[in-house]
Image (cartoon, coloured by chain):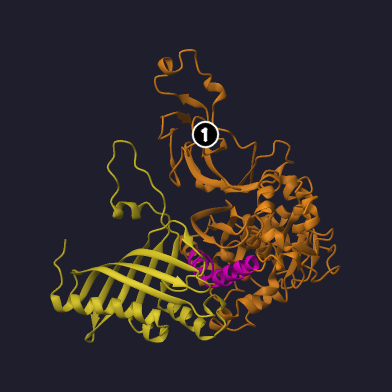
Amino acid sequence: MSGNFSSLVNEEGSRVSRRLFADEAVFEAELEQVFGKSWLFLGHESQVPRPGDFFRTRMGDESIILIRGNDGEVRAFLNSCRHRGLPICRQDKGNAKAFVCPYHAWTYASDGSLRGVPRQSQSYPDGLDKSKLGLVPVAHMANHRGLIFGSFDPDIIPLEDYLGDMAWYLDCHLARAPGGTEVLGLQRWEIDCNWKMPAENQIGDVCHGPFSHVSLFEAAGGIDQPAVTSVVDNGVNVAVPNGHGCVVAGMNEPERELGLGDPSASEAISGHFDKYKAYRVEHLGALREHLDLPTATVFPNFSILGRNSTIRVAHPISATRTEMWSWILVDKAADPEAKEAFRKQYQVTFGPGGMLESDDGENWSGVMYGARGSQSRKQDYVYEMGMGSDGPHAELPGSVGHTFSEHTQRGYYRRWRELMSEAVI
Amino acid sequence: MSALADAETQRAIEQLLYREARLLDERRHMEWLELWHEDARISAPVRENLEVAPGKPPLTRDEELEMLSPAQFFEDDKLILLGRVVRQMTGKAWSENPLTRSCRVISNVEVEAAEREGEFNVYSNSVHYRSRRDGDQSVYPAARRDIVVSENGSFLIRQRLHLYLTDVLPGSFVTFL
Ligand SMILES: [Fe+2]
């Protein structure tokens, strides 16, 4: 095959080559064209509150140090010594004045600058220009309501333009209580699947829910319970430019109180939502006061499951392997009982021990198995559900349609096509 | 360090742990559930990569646990355990159907009498092998600390701290520890 990677997705985004889900040549090109040219999620500001606080994270296939400098600025660098490339940050998180490479003790300050090389006058008698050997910085950094994003692309558009109307939806979750959100911890696990599967599922694949997750729904209250119907029947799918999308619930149920759609919502959770109702009306308006985000994806690999208190990134390991990072996200203002209730509700539903996550992981692997065969990979995957049924909405930004429609996924793959059209096979 | 339990108790509690593992491996979930106390609680904290400052000795594992975030891979009470079992019973838990084959190897069992009468601190290691299809196999080693209680002549597991070895779990399909 020769030509352009963009031929792997049709113009509408409704037919997608199976090569996107198991082909290493496609994967290699994505690392530059998609991960090199997008805004990627790095972490939450509550993980690095004080000067010197750091968090070891990832962007695409790179290990990254996220660190707050002494000047209060949050920066990110490739986690790699300029001398021999070793990761200089080897713990998950902490507070540090400096990072010392374990091999030859090159030492870097929290602003990334190279501060020390052992016996410099002896080992570099002609001098060593340390000012040119600082850690390699991530080109751009930005913060949206506590979510820290970075981009390797020096020419990337500002984050607020990149998110566009997506911010309006994200804020339903991120700004529903004073002080915004904070994270309580991080789970990580690996799945045999392509990294796009979690992203395309969480961008709006509502239609798998009633079938795929039926075992938990039957075990906990039945398939017609409000937790299901408030999304499947009364939710909408919204596609937003630049490949983002979300599922929005509460639109047709203004009387429904946040959190009550979930059978496991405890008094602590519903009490929390009651307490900040006036706050939501004031800061989000009468409509967004009662909207919530069951699932959403910011292109390419960041997602939020609002009802399950998690933000997550699907990190690309190979064409057929993905490492999931899933943070537990709660409202900072919530009292300790509510935070614990949100955390436990997350853990029993999502994450590697979660009963919904296990159904999803099984599916995402299956999609990859179906893309590996020499004959089957000549076929496309079909994303034609609800073609032409989405459009502008009187109250909601973006292109709005039914939850049993794949318009959010079509938007995602159109964005993928746009970025990949610059790469040549 | 508390006193070791007597040989008879040691043997009975070892047998409890082996039976518990076997009932899960044999997919006899309802019988497995009966081995758990009404106030059962399981926790499996997310392991993290920690460093000590130069000049400091390594942290003990207890010190390490105190530094972890509140995030857990599992945090179940008996009601949630029952939920996991009932989910299996629907025949629609697709990550376990086709059936999962498992083999849990339990060893290094130490039993100490706890302060309270009829209560025992039990240490053990487990290696959980899990296989589903076409040679796929995952391995989940863990250290465990249980509290086992004697009630009406039988031993029940009331608490389990399950310490996975890995920081990144293989797969997202772990229905039971
Ligand atoms: Fe799902």
Label 1 environment density (alpha carbons within 10 Å; few <14, some 14–19, many ≥20): many
Residue drawn at x 39%, y 79% is B24
Residue drawn at x 72%, y 50% is A163
> In this rendering, would A152 be left or right of B141?
right
Q: Give how far across and how far down residue A397 sits, in percent.
A: 79, 58
Q: Give how far across and how far down residue A86 sits, in percent.
A: 47, 37
Q: Would you place residue A271 above or below residue A166 in this image?
A: below
Mark 1 CB near ligand 1 (8 Å cut): no
Q: Give how far across and how far down residue A328 sits, in percent.
A: 52, 59
Q: Quadrant of the N terminus of chain A?
A: bottom right
Residue drawn at x 55%, y 58% is A324
Span highlighted in magenta in the image: A343-369
Q: Drawn colour of chain B?
A: yellow
> In this rendering, would A247 be left or right of A103?
right
Q: Does the magenta segment cover residue A355?
A: yes
For label 1, the SS is loop
Q: Amino acid at mark 1?
A: Gly
**Toward which corner of the image does residue A248 lie, by quadrant?**
bottom right
The image quadrant in which ligand 1 is located: bottom right
Q: Which residue is mark 1?
A: A69
Front residue (pair A83, A4): A4
Judge whether residue A194 can be spotted in this image.
yes
Q: Give how far across and how far down residue A14 sits, in percent.
A: 80, 64
> In this rendering, would A275 be left or right of B126?
right
Task: Give the overall secondary structure of the magenta segment.
Answer: helix
Q: Would you place residue A161 above or below residue A175 in this image?
A: above
Q: Drawn colour of chain A?
A: orange
Q: How many marks?
A: 1
Front residue (pair A108, B2): A108
Provide the chain ID for the residue under circle 1.
A
**Toward which corner of the image does residue A265 lie, by quadrant?**
bottom right
Judge whether residue A282 can be spotted in this image.
no
